[in-house]
Amino acid sequence: MAAEAAEKTTFIDNDNPSSAAPDTAAATKQSQQSWITQRFPFLRTKRGIAITVAVILVIIGGGLAGLAALPKHRGGGAAAGEEDGAGDRPGATIDDTYFYGQSPPVYPSPNMTGSGSWTEAFLKAKELVGQMTLAEKVNLTGGVSSNTSCNGFLPAVPRLGFPGMCLSDAGNGLRGTDFVSSWPSGIHVGASWNKALARRRGTGMGGEFRTKGVNVLLGPVVGPAGRVVLSGRNWEGFSSDPYLSGVLVSETVSAVQAVGVITSTKHYVANEQETNRMPSGDTESVSSNIDDRTMHELYLWAFQDAVRAGSGNIMCSYNRLNNSYGCANSKALNGLLKTELGFQGWVVSDWGAQHAGVATALAGMDVVMPTGNALWGSHLADAVNNGSVPESRLDDMVTRTIASWYQMRQDQDFPRPGVGMAMDLTGPHEVIDARNSSSRSTLFDGAVEGHVLVKNIRNALPLQSPKMLSIFGYSAKNPDKTNPSGGLSPWLFGADSFNWTEFGAGFLGWSGDVGKTAIAFNGTIYSGGGSGATPKSTVISPFDVLTQQAYDDGTALFWDFESGTPAVNPMSSACLVFGNAYATEGADRPSLRDDYTDGLIKHVADRCNNTVVIFHNAGIRLVDQFIDHPNVTAVMLAHLPGEASGRALVSLLYGRSNPSGKLPYTVARNESDYAVLGPDLPPEPEGGDMFGSFPQSNFTEGVFVDYRHFDANNITPRYPFGFGLSYTTFNYSNLSVQKAEDQSLNFDEYPTGAVVQGGQADLWDVLVNVSADVTNTGPVDGAEVAQLYVGIPAEGAPVRQLRGFEKPFLNSSSTQTVRFGLTRRDLSVWDVVVQRWRLVRGEYTIEVGGSSRDLPLVGRVTI
């Protein structure tokens, strides 16, 4: 495996993790304790400790120990091998020196240049950093404790007027506090295919972070990128397509930072599974082994868009990348991010993701969270004093951080860091209401547009004042409890509806089964679980709104949320069946379907001739066990709508809103249809695998993920990427494909522009212009997502790749022209030899339509 990966890729880093500061028991213990108190700030209070003492004993006893502990394979390979039995396996790799030298590292770490819009902030930061002592600079490379619930906190430098910085979760809204909104999750935004809505969401969400005194929003997410269909964190990102993710992350970053909050785009890079995401005992984190072309065309793509949009921060990930930890990978950080993409901001570790000292500093990481004491702190000062780390490198680390503070104008009237982040919500605290009434329309519109209607026969929807409505399923109502009760509560992590013990086993390291339950039995879900969860103080469930609607219409309403085989009144005008598909950080999903919910659907459909199915799904959900039942008349994939969930759904069910969402992924007929279904698992100890202590995930499918895989292998999906129904119909016509006429444009094979923020400047030149007419041919006003796909005439390229989309709203019988500009990057492939994007010579295919499998307009252009 490793030999194949090494042969295929030139992207493996040989940084030596053992060049860290001393790996001592004291450092490890200190790191563990700091990780816990920073991630869960209430544990720094006597009350919090009293409430959670039993839980803490479990955590300290072993659950979270692996999260912050240093792996044991460095420098002591033989001993480690003896401990886990590796020494009994002939040929087993027991030391990570095996992986050194597989590709050249990239050093030194590039200094910030202050190019483009960063010039003023850069100069201010250099001046401020120039006045700092060595100790002050070192302090700004690691988190510290605070009297807030900020997930991370950089200390102040009072004598120079720097107030410190609060970093908090996450990309779907501010977690762990009160008086904030529950925004639609990333997957829901992806399903909306709406650039303007993504920007409005970013503005509103960023405003709440700012009001609460949060300097850094720990999001948005574009990694995972959707490679592993069962990945527990796919819901935090936008899509399994890099182009769609890239456009939406660009809008999000621009909007959040426009209100003065720094985005921490994450998780960089190839963080595609939760299984073995962290080292545990004698087993390292899983290594994502990726070839150079796949890295650029798939996994780096959306990060490039985020950098171009000006993201002030990038978070490096837990996984190993080609057998070098993501936060110590000089190729990824120094080479790709800071050199090739011209990144001007700072790199922060994911919480507990640092596993080396000197190596991480030289590899390009700038700040460690939640604390730097274990491997940086005084050790970093020693490394600077003894020459192991140049002071110029330390200066650059701090300059990048301070420059982002200036760049977002946080030196001008920004609230006190963490002012609205009370450490203990169960005790008296200052109320900072961050909600803004102007965001209500965005919360509602965002919730509406992320619903995708995939089946609607016999005019089942919209409902027309039904005489009798029967409601079934565990996911129609709110959970029985959503309350910040103190300690490690389900409310804190979006696990109100899920099995709390199982959640704790995956995310908190408790003992018990992980990833065994596919659904959240105790009510509907508004987000997934983990650090990306959102608070639920103003949520409205579907059942809440349905009861009001039934009252207004005089509809007889019956419900059963408990039974899997409920009694069904045969006189029901319609039966609504609610299910969900839960996912959370810390565990990959066990399946893409569950027999309980599918059995419930079939049971109801056998007794009700108008059965409407609604899923709140934190990822792909298969439907083939019931979809062809003649009485299943409509299916809505409702994703994760946030607080307006109930209002949005009922507006759609009753026709006040017209569905316009499209799938940001492919729904297969069978699990086996996907390129990569589940996570790569480590081999059993007795299996004799040489990499038993070093889990390997070889990305041998290359760029052929999701619809690219289905196209390449001629697999017919149940519902294709980009698919979604409306209550009206649309027609496409008048395709025009024209090369740009600007004589100054470079159509040469390779770009020649200088590196700016996001890469070479001429990668963004529009070389081809495309337009088409879209007509609403039905009786209802509605929006349509017009999608453009490009077939690049290059060896190994997918049949088609999304390269444009627009979402016009069209009144009935009206027509609108949609326009797409194709950039050099859109039309290029990555040349692994020249190490630049190559504009291929030949005939390109341009397709426009309503989904990746419904493309009625086909044109061509030759370059």
Image: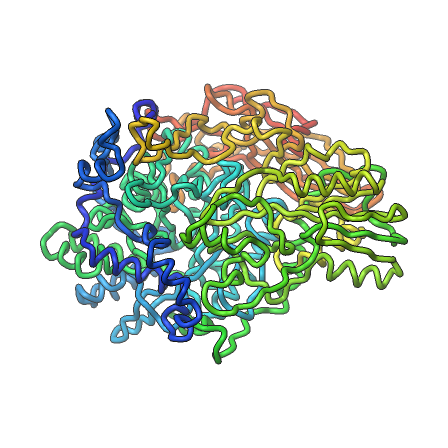
Where residue 687 sits in the image (x, y, percent)? 35, 27
**Left or right for 543, reference 171:** right
Where residue 340 sits in the image (x, y, percent)? 34, 39
Where residue 700 sits in the image (x, y, percent)? 42, 26
**Left or right for 769, reference 744:** right
Q: Nearer the viewer, residue 250 or 723?
A: 723
Quadrant location of residue 455? top right
Where residue 477 sits in the image (x, y, percent)? 69, 58
Residue drawn where x is 24% and y is 64% of the image: 139
Residue 227 visible in this rendered orientation of the protein? no
- Count of numbered tags: 0
- Image height of 438 relative to 745, above or below: below
Colouring of the image = rainbow
Residue drawn where x is 13% and y is 57% of the image: 382
Residue drawn where x is 59% and y is 56% of the image: 497
Q: Nearer the viewer, residue 250 or 371?
A: 371
Residue drawn where x is 53% and y is 50% of the image: 251
Residue at the far left: name it: 386
Q: Nearer the viewer, residue 355 or 751?
A: 355
Residue 98 visible in this rendered orientation of the protein? yes
**Left or right for 248, reference 62:** right
Could you tell me which quadrant the N terminus lies in?
top left
